[in-house]
Image: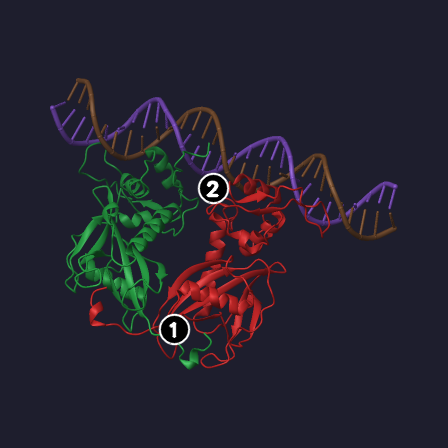
Chain colours: A red, B green, C brown, D purple
Amino acid sequence: MDGYDKYAYEPFAVTADLAVFTLRAGALHVLLVERGEEPYAGRWALPGGFVRPDESAESAARRELGEETGLTDVSGLHLEQLRTYSEPGRDPRMRVVSVAFAALLPDAPEAHGGSDAARARWTPYDAARQLAFDHDRILADARGRVGAKLEYTGLATAFCPPEFTLGELQQVYETVWGAELDRPNFRRKVLATPGFVEAVPGAARLTGGRGKPAALYRAGTAAALHPPLLRPTPEGPPA
Amino acid sequence: MDGYDKYAYEPFAVTADLAVFTLRAGALHVLLVERGEEPYAGRWALPGGFVRPDESAESAARRELGEETGLTDVSGLHLEQLRTYSEPGRDPRMRVVSVAFAALLPDAPEAHGGSDAARARWTPYDAARQLAFDHDRILADARGRVGAKLEYTGLATAFCPPEFTLGELQQVYETVWGAELDRPNFRRKVLATPGFVEAVPGAARLTGGRGKPAALYRAGTAAALHPPLLRPTPEGPPA
DNA sequence: CCTTTTATAGTCAGTGCGACTATAAAAGGG
DNA sequence: CCCTTTTATAGTCGCACTGACTATAAAAGG
């Protein structure tokens, strides 16, 4: 911080950019907005915007999240700072430092244009390519972080509604990891991890599908999973 | 990024602040600099400085690291972005957004004042309190991250010289975690984790102390530890 | 020479987990 | 109304990993 009083600094623009994930039809989707102006006019980009003088990057991210998704209450949603992107050339016109966040939504309300009238759309993760600026990299980093955090936190419940079945929770893992899990083993693991989920006491059951009705659970209070729920290795277990 | 073309942004100052850790005399130490000017004149703070127009926050952090430690080659040192602090009131005079980094040093060269003539000192982590700005919090966050990363990465080797004994590596874990580990079990675990360490082929041994000479190892190539080396839980194993 | 110190090897039991089988409870089709 | 399909849940078996512990090897110091 030396040299501070000489005001030997350059001014930067600071934005908060969001990778908003949700699950739709068994696939990971991300919220994208279409740019209307140069540079990258017509290209898709992660939603975001400038941090205002009276707010933190976290506040700006949450405000943008509400504006872009149209949700009235975003206070309970999981929002997590990823990292900050500051390479000098990442914006062709000026020096912009972007603080990136990842957000997880349980259900997917249809996206509408944000308050600034941009087009917004839920896009399958695999189809989200050729984004504006360095947003391809930010999105890839965000996806990697979410996948990794499923291993050692209860983050997966952020993709689920307030009450969910273990089958739904398992589908979150399978969709994000792109791997199939053994159902009895998944169940045993989740129930054996203290604080991961808690049973809804009433003999509550979910209707709608075929088969035996499933018991309902709520997200637990544990921040970390002990022991972690490790992703299966590509070449099979270390046998 | 909407509204971008209207230049509806406020200018921010962006700094890179560093939590530089090393091990000295079996205790975790952090590099602090003394502030010479208001605000917080005379208080200790994390080293850092403004990001220049032609560099990224990472480049600025590495540059500052070299200036503050006096090391001539900081290219191989572990430097990791932590998170960005952007609360409006964190600097009393102006809007400063700080990108925080953690750095790990194997040995501790005596700190001298940086290029800008500030006093610098290695301080035991537990004695680093009442720092300027929100640096208490940044330092605590950095320490938490380092402790957690020892579990699932080979980061501990960044505290060690290029060739080290397993006893030295174990001391890194014990010092950072503040817990004692069983030596035979630690050895078995480390050697069983592929890519964590690799033996120095020559019958190389370390001299200096009492007891049987120890074999030397180098840091392996694995980025992640599979399976992780979990921290012992405070209440003992989940028996 | 014996003790101390540190490194390394090995043993044993309990736990977690992958793979698998079995049973329960629903819907749907003949 | 039975039988198949589907999904949930319970349980078994064996192996790998790990914590606790014991034993041996190789150095320094008195």
Q: Residue at x 38, y 52 (%)?
A: B223
Q: How many marks?
A: 2
Please tell me whether mark 1 sits on a helix, a strand or a loop. Answer: loop
Q: CA distance from mark 1 to mark 2?
A: 40 Å
Point out residue D27 in the picture as x, y percentages from the top left corner: 19, 31
- Give the labeled residue for mark 1: A90
Q: Is residue A91 above or below residue B120?
A: below
Horizontal arrangement in the rendering, residue B76 relative to residue B121 (left or right): right
Please tell me whether mark 2 sits on a helix, a strand or a loop. Answer: loop
Mark 2 chain: A
Q: Quadrant of the N terminus of chain B?
A: bottom left
Q: What's the amino acid at mark 1?
A: Arg
Q: Residue at x 47, y 66 (%)?
A: A63
Q: What's the amino acid at mark 2?
A: Pro
| Residue B146 in view | yes
Earlier in the chain: of badge 1 and badge 2, it is 1
Horizontal arrangement in the rendering, residue A141 relative to residue B181 (left or right): right
Numbered circle sitting on residue A227:
2
Point out residue D8 in the picture as x, y percentages from the top left corner: 66, 44
Q: Is residue A32 above or below residue B157?
A: below
Point out residue C30 in the picture as x, y percentages from the top left corner: 88, 51
| Residue B219 in view | no
Numbered circle sitting on residue B102:
none
**Residue A120 falls in image quadrant:** bottom right
Q: Residue at x 31, y 74 (%)?
A: A11
Horizontal arrangement in the rendering, residue A212 relative to residue A69 (left or right): right
Most foreground residue, A103 or B23? A103
